[in-house]
Image (cartoon, rainbow, N blue to C red):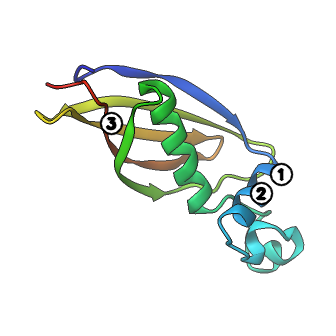
Amino acid sequence: MNVGEELAPLEIAVTRTLIVAGAVASRDYQDVHHDAELAREKGSSDIFMNILTTNGLVGRYVTDHFGPAAVLRRVAIRLGAPNYPGDTMVLSGKVTALGSDGTAEVSIVGANGLGRHVTGTVTISVPGESA
């Protein structure tokens, strides 16, 4: 791990199945995540991804890059533009800081056709790594 190290971008197809399955798996039964008609009644153009699904995808992105020994220590994200079905979210990241205890801070951005869906930082540790 080195400061400035960039993670390879990851493209994720945002499908209805991904949105609904993520909501159900995280026990988020809000209608805006599975019922397009009710989502439109509430002012959305369609169903949209919930934050817990986004959080899981961000964690997967970072651990896929650093390997199976990587441990998420902190995930701090903020949502922006919604992830609607039919779009693609592209995750990108960069190591922004290293700790003497083998931790790294990674800045994350997930963009879609509307703009930035998610921004934030992830702190990870990788056993055997030290600054």
- At mark 2, the secondary structure is helix
Which of the 4 image quadrants contains residue 7?
A: top left
Q: Are marks 2 and 1 in contact (CB under 8 Å)?
A: yes
Q: Which residue is mark 2?
A: 21
The one nearer the camera, 16 or 84, is 16
- Residue 106 placement, left or right of 85: left
Quadrant for the N terminus, please: top left
Q: Residue 120 or 43: which is nearer the viewer?
A: 120
Amino acid carrying label 3: it is: Val
Q: Is residue 28 left or right of residue 94?
A: right
Q: Bin the neighbour count of mark 2 within 10 Å (Cα to Cα): few under 14, some 14-19, many 20 and up.
A: some
Given the image, on which type of amino acid does mark 2 rest? Ala
Which label number is shown at residue 110? Answer: none
Instruction: In this rendered view, identify the residue nearer to me: 44 or 104.
Output: 104
Dot 3 corresponds to which residue? 106
Q: Is residue 31 above or below residue 98?
A: below
Query: Where is residue 128, by image quadrant?
Result: top left
Label 1: state its secondary structure: helix
- Give the residue furthest to the right: 37
Residue 30 x/y as whole percent: 72, 77
Residue under the point 24% across and 19% down: 2
Categorize mark 3 by other alpha carbons within 10 Å: few (<14), some (14-19), many (20+). Answer: many
List the residue tagged with mark 1. Answer: 17
Q: Residues within 10 Å of mark 1 (few under 14, many from 20)?
A: few
The residues bearing labels 3 and 2 have C-alpha atoms spaced at a distance of 27 Å
Could you tell which of marks 3 and 2 lies nearer the N-terminus? 2
What x and y, as percent, mark residue 129?
Answer: 23, 24
Distance from label 3 to label 1 (Cα)? 29 Å
Identify the residue at horizontal 77%, vertical 57% (top origin). Answer: 21
